[in-house]
Image (tube, rainbow, N blue to C red):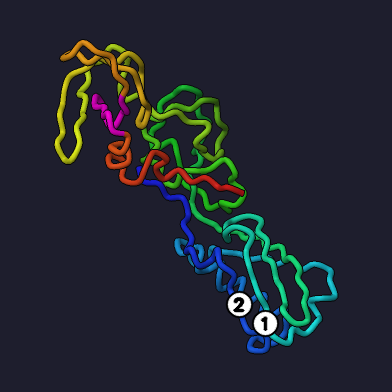
Amino acid sequence: MASNYLRYPLALVLTLILTGPAYGSNIDAIETYINATVYSSLPGFARDDITINIQYPANALLRTDCSQTLNFKWRGYPQAGQNTVKTACAAPRWQLYVAVNIQAFKEVVVSAGPLARNKPLISSELTLRRMDIGSLRLGYFDDPEQLRGYLLQRTLQSGQVITPYIVKAPALISRGDWVTIRSGSSGLVVTSTGEALKDGVLGDQIPLKNLNSDTRIRAWVIAKGVVSTKRGDVQAQTGQGLQGTVKRNNN
């Protein structure tokens, strides 16, 4: 699975300055800046999938000419959901805050029909529905195949969004299993055999008994029947990390 949380350019953290007169009124300048930065911050979305709603404060400063520059800065990063942009003028000196609601639509995994608790999922029981991810505060998945074998923690009705909090990854290792233990460094991989002392899913650190040395160790589950003493092997095995294509929103 590959982590797919949204990434934004570092430049967006910095204050971006636009020349007021070049964009006409303050409203024009604000809208030009907001639209440009939102579209560049959501590269995985087509423009038709993004809706931007700018809410201006009832403030007379919006009608005050800025003789020098307008200065814009996001509070955090532009992302689906509620955002705030600070707008400031150097001369005459004033500032105000503009609320920006961003809707970003994409297809997410939902239940195709009623689903029972603790029943392993199959892709035919799931479907995709186009939704605004800004409203999915508990996260979501975007690939039904990714959830094959996962267990539901509760019963679902038809059309409910599958979130990381209501599914449990299938165990790749069960207590009592003999497993391959990978260890070593500097490109040298050493393998040994161990006995799992606890069930484990991908990314879990579990206790084991090394059958070669008769010692107890802890290692991370990286595949079915395979553990590693290096946590970095989990990320290498899954591509980009434990969360996979689970998407979480931080709003």
At horizontal 47% and vertical 47% (from top left) the residue drawn is: 128
Type of amino acid at the residue the image marks with label 2 = Ile
At horizontal 72% and vertical 84% (from top left) the residue drawn is: 25
Residue 198: x and y in percent read 35, 15
Of helix, strand and loop, which mostly describes the magenta segment?
Answer: strand
In magenta segment, residue 4: no
Residue at the disc numbered 2: 17
Crowding at dot 1, Cα within 10 Å, few <14 / some 14-19 / many 20+, comes out as some
Lower position in the chain sequence, tag 1 or tag 2: 2
Is 231 situated above or below 246? above
Residue 30: x and y in percent read 67, 75
Asked if disc 1 and disc 2 are in contact, CB closer than 8 Å, the reply is yes
Element assignment for label 1: strand
Residue 163: x and y in percent read 52, 38
| Near-viewer residue (8 or 100) | 8
Residue 121 occupies quadrant:
top left
Is 53 situated above or below 183? below
Horizontal side of 87 relative to 157 (left or right) equals right
Type of amino acid at the residue the image marks with label 1 = Thr
Residue 24 occupies quadrant:
bottom right
